[in-house]
Image: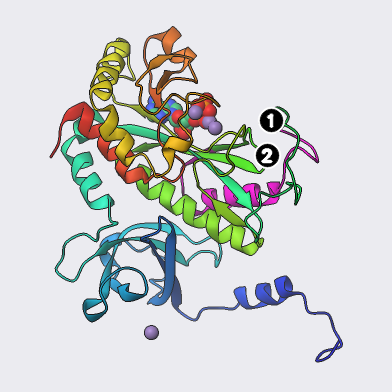
């Protein structure tokens, strides 16, 4: 030991500072979506309102230096407009996470701000009470971009034992998955569940049912938490839809959808009418359902082919699946299996509502 004779535990040291009184202030971490399909964040101090929670409308608009990401250097400030507040699981309450929309200097939405358009669609069609539940699949990579638990040279044993697997050799990094689950609940994200996926080192979490614009807000904040927690564990998150080519499952963002008409008796007629409309705009949907999705939607590995629209009850090889219990009951919801894991949930939920009920 060169500089100290005691072994320093970084966790204990961090916890010592996290417990310090904040003397009447709270920390607000502003989170936004960047040009690469990830999240970025920075923090500022706000006054503690004596334990009372902030409303979105009370939070200051902020900005960041867009030249370090996308915007031109001479006019590089991008505004951060607060749109949703969550409790901060890292610093603990009363500290908060503030999801923010990116707005250009002239007041128009930033190029990568898909929330703006989505929220208009959701408002216009709010009378149908659109519910969404998204299944986010992802792959855990080490710092060399190799899936965790995979041999340095070569491949693990073929797929089969890994889906919902239990036991050493079948799953890895469950600590990250559980930390994320708890952090989502603490933050107030409507996380619905989690499971190990078909490819080793691949996992899924579901968020929903969420109403309208809330779907994109909750999923993006859940993605931020996942990246932030993986950082704590020294892992990387990949949302590439086909992280390993060949006989390995890709990663999707299955999107479950219903309206108030679909959720009651007689709902199947509304479900089938929606599927007919989706069929007519297959290519438009594929265009916003994620990059590199053609590597995943091959018609194999529980997917439909990218150039063909198909649907069926309990059919996991179709574009659209009606869950078996929905088919049996005659009402409920359906699943759009086409979106890739790297798709923007605002674009998915926006185009589904637009196709079913019209543009704004
Ligand atoms: P799968 O069987 O395809 O793996 P999951 O259980 O992973 O399905 O995910 C189903 C998702 O559907 C969940 O996020 C759930 O919240 C959502 N969901 C359930 N009911 C509805 C509904 N009526 N409308 C929209 N989404 C729903
Ligand atoms: Mn600076
Ligand atoms: Mn699932
Ligand atoms: Mn899955
Ligand atoms: Mn699914």
Q: Quadrant of the N terminus?
A: bottom right
Q: Quadrant of the C terminus?
A: top left
**What residue span does the magenta drawing correspond to?**
163-192
Q: Is residue 118 above or below residue 320?
A: below
Is residue 179 a member of the stretch shown in magenta?
yes
Q: Residue at x 27, y 11 (%)?
A: 269
Q: Residue 50: horizontal and vertical position, in percent?
A: 41, 71
Sequence-wise, which precedes: disc 1 or disc 2?
1
Is residue 256 a member of the stretch shown in magenta?
no
The answer to whether residue 147 is visible is yes
Do the CB atoms of the residues marked 1 and 2 lie less than 8 Å apart?
A: yes
Crowding at dot 1, Cα within 10 Å, few <14 / some 14-19 / many 20+, comes out as some
For this rendering, which residue is in front, 360 or 54? 360
The residue identified by callout 2 is 200
3D distance between C-alphas at marks 1 and 2: 8 Å
Q: Is residue 190 above or below residue 356?
A: below
The answer to whether residue 134 is visible is no
The residue identified by callout 1 is 159
Q: Residue at x 22, y 27 (%)?
A: 356
Q: Residue at x 18, y 29 (%)?
A: 357
Q: Residue 54: horizontal and vertical position, in percent?
A: 35, 64
């Amino acid at each position: 030991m060169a500089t100290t004779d005691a072994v320093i535990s970084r966790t204990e040291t961090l916890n010592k500072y996290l417990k310090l009184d904040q003397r009447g202030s709270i920390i607000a971490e502003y989170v936004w979506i960047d040009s690469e399909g990830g999240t970025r964040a920075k923090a500022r101090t706000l006054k503690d309102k004596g334990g009372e929670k902030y409303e979105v409308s009370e939070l200051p608009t902020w900005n960041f230096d867009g030249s370090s990401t996308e915007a031109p250097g001479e006019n590089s400030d991008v505004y951060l407009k607060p749109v949703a507040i969550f409790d901060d699981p890292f610093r603990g309450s009363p500290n908060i996470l503030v999801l923010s929309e990116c707005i250009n200097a002239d007041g128009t939405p930033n190029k990568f701000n898909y929330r703006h358009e989505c929220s208009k669609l959701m408002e216009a069609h709010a009378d149908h009470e659109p519910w969404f539940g998204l299944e986010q699949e992802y792959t855990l990579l080490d710092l060399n971009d190799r899936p965790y638990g995979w041999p340095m040279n070569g491949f693990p044993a073929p797929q089969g034992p890994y889906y919902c697997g239990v036991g050493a050799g079948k799953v890895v990094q469950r600590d990250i998955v559980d930390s994320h689950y708890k952090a989502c609940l603490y933050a107030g994200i409507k996380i619905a569940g989690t499971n190990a996926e078909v490819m080793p080192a691949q996992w899924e979490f579901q968020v929903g049912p969420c109403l309208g614009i809330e779907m994109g807000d909750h999923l993006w904040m859940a993605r931020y938490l996942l990246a932030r927690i993986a950082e704590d564990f020294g892992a990387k998150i990949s949302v590439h839809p086909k992280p390993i080519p060949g006989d390995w499952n890709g990663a999707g963002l299955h999107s479950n959808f219903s309206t108030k008409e679909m959720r009651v008796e007689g709902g199947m007629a509304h479900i089938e009418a929606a599927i007919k409309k989706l069929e007519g705009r297959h290519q438009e949907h594929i265009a916003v359902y994620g990059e590199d999705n053609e590597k995943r939607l091959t018609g194999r590995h529980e997917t439909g082919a990218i150039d063909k629209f198909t649907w069926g009850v309990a059919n996991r090889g179709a574009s659209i699946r009606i869950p078996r219990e929905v088919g049996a009951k005659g009402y409920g919801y359906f699943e759009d299996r086409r979106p890739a894991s790297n798709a923007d949930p605002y674009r998915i939920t926006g185009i589904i509502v637009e196709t079913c009920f019209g543009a704004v």
